Amino acid sequence: MHSLQRNYWAVRDYLSPVLKESKFKEHGRITPEEFVAAGDFLTYKFGVWTWEKGDASKTRDYLPADRQYLITRGVPCLRRAASLAYTDADEDAERLLSFSDSLAPADGDEWVETHAGRKASHNANTPGDIEDIPDLDDGPTESATDAMGELSLSGAKNAQANETPDLDEIPDMDEDLEEGDDEATAAPSKTPISNVTEANEIEVSRGNLLQVRTYDVMITYDKFYQTPAVWLLGYDENGTPLKPAQIFQDVPADHAFKTVTIEPFLHSTSLQAALVHPCKHASVMRKIIERMNTGVVEEQRKLSGGPSASLKDKEGKKKWLFRRTSGSKDDKLPPNTGEEEEVEGMRVDYYLVIFLKFIASIVPTIEVDSTTSL
């Protein structure tokens, strides 16, 4: 069944037309030219990303031959997705407690105990006996001045302490070593020493170390959905490729086998990787860009010295101010008419930067977002 679905996707992708008009602000979709422009910006700002050609038989003609997809290698994955899930339903439960005495009316100050569902490591009702802390007033009355007065520089003890010992009485260490073996010396081993480490010893030593997985993250262009798509190829701490079951350990349960599945890589004849399905990418990116574009437009208007305006016209319709419209000479406005100057808004160059931040929310254990400096 899955093979039939893959064949259907291949035919669908082949028959889909190539997007020619820019719609990344209205619909969250981009053209292949905009994908290349956004990829160039990503590789320029962040050197960990590079362009790859892929197999010649899998080259997409709507993309440049030397810029088929983006890749970054060695992305760390420090923990499994199960460590982010809360298994105890009452772990974050709260309850209201009071400091007032049981004999007194319950009108004292109250406080909130968090994580009431967690098991305590000790019994709060029987905290144990605490010894009395001595008071400073009950201590000895002898002052430090009296104690210093009892010291004598001419006493017998001080004189005995200041005597220089005879050097002849100090034993020689070499003589002691010649008489017998040193007790601190380890006895020679009767069995030959082997350089081979047992497997169980390796497993014990690994328990004290952090198991770090790494991923190769690839970004391709999906012609049907007209958005980028992310592929994940994982390796363990020894550089061995991860099995599909191990890869899904790093994907939250809400997305495993649904949003993220194992598929043949678009630009390879033999490689299979985990694909983050791009079916919802356009709608999510449209919402993110719409929110961010409002702030970008306002900031550009402030820098240009123009009046601050919203992105809605008088009729309440959304007005995207990212593209200048062409017109005839008669359509030109006369100078000094008071009309607001159009601003560009968010550029398409930042599309992949925003896209990586969105992907980081799908696979939070894999540090795919290397654009935190922006």
Image: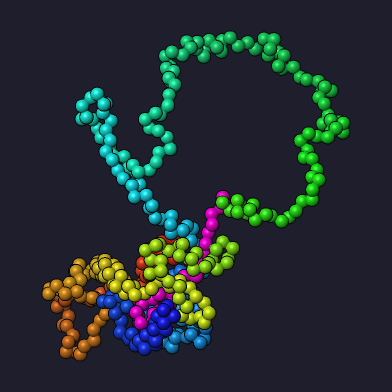
The residue at 77%/51% (across/down) is: 193
Residue lying at the far front in this picture: please name it.
1
Magenta span includes 76 = no
Q: Position of residue 335 (x, y in %)?
A: 17, 80
Q: Tell me which corner region of the image, top left, top right, bottom left or bottom right, holds residue 348.
A: bottom left
Chief SS of the magenta region: strand
> What colouring method underlies this structural image?
rainbow
Which quarter of the rendering shows the C terminus?
Answer: bottom left
**Visible in this render: residue 44?**
no
Q: Tell me which corner region of the image, top left, top right, bottom left or bottom right, holds residue 156.
A: top right
Residue lying at the far left in this picture: please name it.
315
Q: Tell me which corner region of the image, top left, top right, bottom left or bottom right, holds residue 299.
A: bottom left
Chain part drawn in magenta: 208-234
Q: Eyeballing the image, is 61 above or below 46? A: below
Which quarter of the rendering shows the N terminus?
Answer: bottom left
The residue at 48%/85% (across/down) is: 58
The residue at 77%/40% (across/down) is: 186
The residue at 52%/14% (across/down) is: 144
Q: How many marks?
A: 0
Q: Eyeballing the image, is 314 above or below 137? A: below
Which is more toward the observer, 353 or 324? 353
Q: Position of residue 94 (x, y in %)?
A: 29, 43
Q: Position of residue 3 (x, y in %)?
A: 44, 80
Q: Position of residue 236 (x, y in %)?
A: 55, 63
**Visible in this render: residue 29?**
yes
Which is more toward the observer, 3 or 359? 3
